[in-house]
């Protein structure tokens, strides 16, 4: 049982993992800070926060190189309502060490709710805290998740997931939505609204709101295909040439074309066009953007060019899909990779 003794209504601890991402961390901690006081002094009156570590005083480097130095040790975990595990880069050295995992496990044993931001959820799973639970994962890390974990249900179509006292968030701006939910739950709607106004946020998303861009094709196990498709996803509005993509994955254009045909059954050009059109379909169903703006976002020269390819691929023009959203969502669902 949690033996929290603080007078504050909300008490939160943060553990920063190596190469953690700044945006989700700062989104949560700043929302707490702005909600904690009636005036603009950032005093920790209504809620308190600490950055803890088994090695206090030793800086932790974020994914962008900025370092933050935890000042609190981990001896009094029972005082916290939430322990927020802030993850980041998956493929740049070790994640949490065994001592950190033990701290997370101990906090969970005391009844503290555990929150995973970005890839902090991966560490929660490795700590044995998510078996049988639903876990929010960014579409960007969805395939990394499937490769490592088999007994946890990944959720890649929501910004965050609350499963009892285990809370997971895809990261990025979604952490702000989660932070506002936490503040409203513990401190009331007025406190959350005050923080959001200062942060110049006029609308907060619910947990079930969709992530901005899901994966649009089933990724191959081939590393070069995976890297090429990721490059395409990151360059939707200004498409690269096949030569540029092949240079980025360090193979010739002809070899890239053979590899795509072997593993995906289509050419790189066709794959790129399909990704852009599917992203356009998603935007038609989930945003109010004009078709001309969607066309530009998806790398087409104009709306008519986009509409022509869209109609050929989906058998209906963009305007028709937008007016028949149920049919559009059915098409989109059938296009998404299995289990998304």
Image (tube, rainbow, N blue to C red):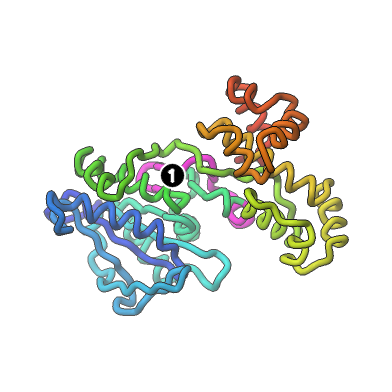
The answer to whether 265 is drawn above or below residue 319 in the figure is below
Closer-to-camera residue (305/246):
305
Which image quadrant is residue 100 in? bottom left
Determine whether the residue tagged by mark 1 lies in a helix, strand or loop.
strand
**Measured from the top left, where is residue 39 in percent x and y?**
12, 52
286 to the left or right of 98: right
**Measured from the top left, where is residue 172 in percent x and y?**
45, 53
Residue at 47%, 50% in the rendered image: 170
> For the image shown, how many numbered marks are present on the structure?
1
Closer-to-camera residue (124/45):
45
Residue at 46%, 56% in the rendered image: 118
Which image quadrant is residue 105 in? bottom left
The answer to whether 83 is drawn above or below residue 206 in the figure is below
Residue at 48%, 46% in the rendered image: 136
The residue that disc 1 covers is 160
Which residue is at the far bottom?
Answer: 58
Q: Residues within 10 Å of mark 1 (few under 14, many from 20)?
A: many
Q: Could you tell me which quadrant the C terminus lies in? A: top right
Q: Which residues are magenta?
A: 143-167
Is residue 168 visible to us here?
no
120 to the left or right of 306: left
Residue at 76%, 56% in the rendered image: 241
27 magenta-colored: no
**Measured from the top left, where is residue 225 in percent x and y?**
75, 57
**Measured from the top left, where is residue 226 in percent x and y?**
71, 57
Is residue 30 visible to us here?
yes
201 to the left or right of 193: right
Which image quadrant is residue 107 in? bottom left
152 magenta-colored: yes
């Amino acid at each position: 049982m949690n033996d929290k003794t603080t007078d504050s209504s909300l008490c939160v601890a943060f553990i920063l993992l190596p190469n953690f991402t700044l945006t989700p961390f700062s989104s949560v901690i700043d929302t707490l800070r702005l909600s904690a006081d009636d005036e603009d002094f950032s005093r920790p009156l209504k809620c308190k926060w600490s950055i803890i570590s088994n090695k206090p005083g030793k800086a932790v480097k974020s994914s962008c190189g900025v370092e933050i130095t935890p000042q609190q040790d981990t001896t009094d975990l029972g005082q916290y309502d939430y322990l927020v595990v802030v993850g980041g880069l998956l493929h740049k050295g070790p994640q949490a060490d065994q001592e950190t995992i033990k701290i997370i496990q101990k906090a969970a044993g005391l009844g503290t709710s555990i929150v995973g931001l970005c890839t902090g959820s991966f560490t929660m799973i490795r700590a044995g805290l998510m078996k049988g639970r639903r876990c929010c994962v960014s579409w960007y890390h969805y395939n990394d998740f499937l490769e490592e974990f088999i007994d946890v249900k990944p959720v890649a179509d929501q910004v965050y997931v609350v499963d009892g006292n285990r809370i997971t968030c895809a990261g990025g701006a979604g952490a702000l939505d989660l932070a506002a939910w936490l503040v409203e739950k513990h401190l009331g709607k007025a406190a959350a609204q005050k923080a959001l106004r200062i942060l110049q946020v006029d609308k907060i998303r619910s947990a079930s709101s969709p992530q901005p861009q899901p994966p649009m094709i089933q990724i191959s196990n081939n590393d070069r295909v995976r890297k090429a498709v990721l490059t395409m996803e990151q360059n939707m509005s200004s498409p690269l040439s096949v030569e540029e993509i092949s240079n980025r994955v360090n193979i010739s254009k002809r070899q890239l074309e053979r590899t795509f045909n072997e593993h995906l059954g289509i050419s790189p050009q066709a794959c790129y066009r399909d990704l852009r059109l599917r992203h356009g379909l998603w935007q038609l169903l989930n945003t109010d953007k004009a078709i001309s703006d969607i066309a530009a976002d998806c790398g087409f020269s104009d709306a008519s060019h986009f509409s022509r390819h869209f109609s050929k691929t989906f058998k209906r023009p963009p305007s028709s899909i937008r007016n028949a959203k149920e049919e559009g969502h059915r098409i989109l669902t059938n296009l998404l990779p299995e289990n998304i």
